Image (tube, rainbow, N blue to C red):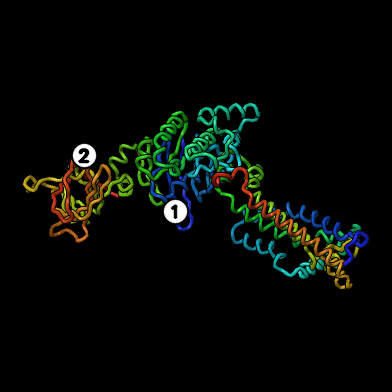
Amino acid sequence: MSLFVDISKKYDGFTLDIQIDAGNGITGLLGASGCGKSMTLQCISGIIKPDSGVIVLNGQTIFDSKKKINIPIRRRNVGYSFQHFSLFPHMTVEENIHFALRSRSKKERTREADEKIVMFGLEDFRKRYPGQLSGGQKQRVALARMLAGSPEILMLDEPFSALDKHIRLSLENELMRVLDAFPYTTLYVSHDMDEVYRICPQIAVIHEGKIEDQGRREHLLLEPQTLASARISGCKNLSPARKTGEYTLFAEDWGIRLQSEKPVPDDLRYIGIRARHLREIQPDEAAGSPNMFEAHVDYQSETRFDNTIICRLSGADVPEDARILWLFDKMYNTKPYQNGQTIYLHIPPASLHLLCR
Amino acid sequence: MDLTSAGIAAVDFSPFFISMKASVLATFFVFFAGVAAARWSLRLPRRISGVIDGVFTLPMVLPPTVVGFGLLLLLGAQSPVGQFLTSIGHRIVFSFSATVLAAGVVAFPMMYRTARGAFEQVDNNLISAARTLGHGEWTIFWKVYMPLAWPGVAAGTILAFARALGEFGATLMLAGNIPGRTQTMPIAVFAQVEAGHTEQALLWVIIIVIIAFAAVFLMNFLTMRKSHFRKGDDGV
């Protein structure tokens, strides 16, 4: 079973132009807010009508602008979990689930509803209204209701955004059980790369209404190919760059020459370096070694476990505002740093992300 | 003022019954027309919706005499509609139906506007959710829209009833002042004052004030009371 999407839609000066080809299992749609992730789900479910294109769900064409096919929402059979759950406030937990059931006989519906209520551990809340539930309970009701309709595809829009951080992990575990048991395609929308990485084996990065990059999660987040996917994968040091030799390049924002372990592609446009990959080295071992730079501590920001230092690069060719982020685990480096202090940073040639888009 | 039992017995109470009958009937029709118009107007493209909204609101902002004059033009003996009605043996003008019609037209915007406001408050995601769950528009209207918009719709109904009960100008233009047939309470007040019967006028004034106050009280009760499912938080 599968989902094929190739649609475009203009809306308020924003252009959505999305191609997705997803098989069974979970595909994550990752992107900053306003990039068109939710709009994509709305187009697939039929809430928004695309201007043009094709949507094929499990072999059935549910939208085709050329053939004038536009199956109404109620017959698309999609399981849609909305960002804020969208439970019907005037219906009890039980009634919310009942409302989703499609079976003809009442007996059958009651049996199915009971099954979902037990499955999601909602026995004690069945007569409660959504307003009387905690966030986690609401989410379970939303999932139960979504599955009660026997959907042919699941679409989850930021399922954890309305929940407190501390209850997310156990709910995520619960959600994974549900998603793993679902036999068809699941689309999982989020802006949180860690969450998407944990949940989705396949990821598509969306940037300004377009699919920027898609593929297996290891490939995407560990070896991003484009500026947008590098940024969303949490790469903090990004600069325009150009090739200067087979293994060398020039990072324009920082005014430095870098050596890469991998051959530099001819159409190189950006360079990305993870703050975590920088190393501090001593001046004596630094002499003459490649990718070594003198810098000054500009600003420090500590969390419980990490220390992030914003470094000002120094040197003749270095632009005035050249800054580079260096992050390290406080467990391995307990030295105090003073603002203005001179340090020497090494950028391992294997750690460079060479980006052509 | 002669409000002894003998004095009250001498009063002709027909305006009370005519008013109540006309207002209840008008409210009944206006309820369905207003709810349907509100729902329909919200589904129109925004620009057209604005024009339609203006037309539907007009009877509220125009002087009632203008509304009555318009209805007279539309339904009078010279108009095509009037001629058609005469041909099938009906006469609207100066009949009880005219009382109902005049009250209904003037009360309609109250129902329409309040219902529209209540429908606009319903979270669109809930409607989308109901659609993805496989429901058609009719089911969604009765199972989702109406229950969620109910306090507003109920308030609109009461407002419409109160407005219908207080209708004077359009009724006088279209239905006239025929005691026992089209003379409603507000018209009775006018007629009694004009005839110098201040006590009788005062009696009608007191009755109208009591009914109006009860209506406003009921409306506040309905809109302020939290629905059983809204205890706790907004529920969404």
Q: In the picture provided, is A151 more to the left or to the right than A282?
A: right
Q: Residue at horizontal 72%, vertical 69%?
A: B62
With respect to residue B164, does A237 lie above or below?
above
Where is residue A110 shown, x and y percent of the image?
A: 62, 28
Q: Which mark is residue A331?
A: 2
Q: Please name whichever residue, A357 or B14, is drawn nearer the observer in this view of the structure.
A: B14
Q: Which mark is residue B23?
A: none
Where is residue B160 shown, x and y percent of the image?
A: 73, 58
Q: Residue at horizontal 51%, vertical 49%?
A: A50
**Tag 2: amino acid:** Met
Determine whether the residue tagged by mark 1 lies in a helix, strand or loop. strand
Where is residue A160 shown, x and y percent of the image?
A: 43, 41
Determine whether the residue tagged by mark 2 lies in a helix, strand or loop. loop
Mark closer to the chain start, 1 or 2? 1
**Tag 1: amino acid:** Thr
Q: Nearer the viewer, mark 1 or mark 2?
A: 2
Q: Based on the displayed image, in which of its 4 quarters is residue A202 positioned?
A: top left
With respect to residue A5, does A122 lie above or below?
above
With respect to residue B105, does A77 lie above or below?
above
Dot 1 and dot 2 residues touching (CB under 8 Å): no
Q: Which mark is residue A15?
A: 1
Q: In the picture provided, is A338 more to the left or to the right than A356?
A: left
